[in-house]
Structures are given as structure tokens and as C-alpha cells.
Image (spheres, rainbow, N blue to C red):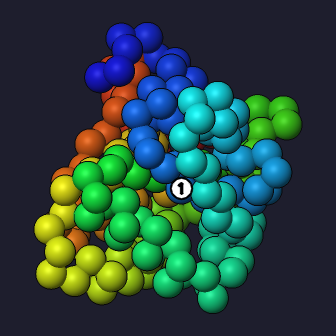
Amino acid sequence: QVSPDANYPIRTQYNAENAAITIDFTQDASKGSGATKKNVNASGNKYQPVVVDSNGLMKNTDNIDALAKVIADNLTSGQVVNIAGHGAYKATRLGSAGFNEAIQQSVFDNELNKIFERVKFFIGDKPITGTVISGGQSGYDEAGIKAARKIGVPTQVNYTGEGLYRPPEAT
């Protein structure tokens, strides 16, 4: 628990400051997924946007290997990788960068599994000395943790408040 206050910007800032690189799955690379890009830039750490469409799918799948290699290099050199992005729920805040409709968690899981299977390939027999972190919300955060764990990468979910789960059908 990063803070007892149910305040996601605190969690976002904590993850941005404590990761060597943040991989941000967003519909708009110029904005990022909410406060993520702003916090990463303020921390001086690396920010890597991955542009997705309104269905939660990566727009440029030709770059999966390049992205997977970046993640693998960080994980085999003792670095922390933050997986961030839009939640699976329908965005309700005016001006929000989220999705117009709720998306099933399995869509995000499939996208991150594709990436982490390639991460596993690039890691090969090198020891994994890094960690994947996320804020734990539904969508890309949850999918990143599950995909990393699936290939044996240590993970950490950093949350605020009581760590309550917001299912995709919530608004």
C-alpha cells in the first residue's frame, strides 16, 4: 500500500518515480493515460507509450519485438518496469483519456501475453534481476502483472486506499 488515501494520482506518482521505465498503453501518445506521462517526465525516468485503439488492441504490432527487448533488457539488468495504461472500465470523467465503453479484461490479458512471450524469448537463459510493477487497476495494469508472473518475473502491485477492485462494468 503506497498510501491509505484512495487517491490514484499518489500511486501513479509512486510508480513513475520508482521505475526505470514506464510502458504506458494509451490511445494518445501525446497525452498518455492520465497522469502517467506527466509523472514519469517529472521523475526523469524513461517513458515509452504504446498506442492502442478504442478496442484496447495495440495499433502497431510490428514493434512487439522492439518493446519486448526493451522490457527484457531492463529485467535482466536489475531494473523496475512499470506497466501502466487505461483501465478496462468506461471512462466517465470529462476529458478522460480512457475508453468510451468497458472492455473485457481478457482483451488486455491477450495483448500483454503476446508481449511477455517475446520478453521471455529475449531473456533466454539470463537471470531475471528486475521487477514489473503496476498500480493494479483493471486493464493493462492487471494484465501486465499476470503476464509477467506467467513467465516467472517478480511483480509488485502498488495501490492506494483499501485496494478495492473496480470491475469493467463499473463506471
Decide which of 69, 116 is in the foreground and name it: 69
Look at the picture and state if 94 lies above or below 30: above
Q: Which residue was labeled with disc 1?
A: 23
Q: Which image quadrant for residue 95? A: top right
Residue at (66% x, 36% y) in the render: 41
Query: Whole-percent x and y of residue 170?
Result: 56, 42
The quadrant of the image that shows the N terminus is top left
Q: Is residue 58 above or below residue 149?
A: below
* Foreground pick, 118 / 161: 118
Residue 34 horizontal/vertical position (percent): 69, 38
The residue drawn where x is 51% and y is 35% is 16
| Residue found at the very far top of the displayed protein | 5
Is 101 drawn above or below residue 59 in the view shown? above
| Secondary structure under the numbered disc 1 in the rendered image | strand
Task: For residue 124, say whether it is visible.
Answer: yes
For the C terminus, the quadrant is top right
Pick the residue in front: 33 or 94. Answer: 33
Residue at x 40% of width, y 22% of height: 160
Question: Residue sitting at 79 percent across and 45 percent down?
Answer: 31
Q: Amino acid at mark 1?
A: Ile
User: Label 1 crowding class (10 Å Cα cut-off): few <14, some 14-19, many 20+?
Assistant: many
Q: Quadrant of residue 164?
A: top left
Left or right relative to 120: residue 19: right
Asked whether, in this view, residue 164 is left or right of residue 52, the answer is: left
Left or right of 50, for residue 17: left
Residue 157 in the figure: left or right of residue 97: left
Name the residue furthest front: 77
- Horizontal and vertical percent for residue 47? 61, 50
In percent of width and height, residue 85 lies at 58, 51
How many discs appear?
1
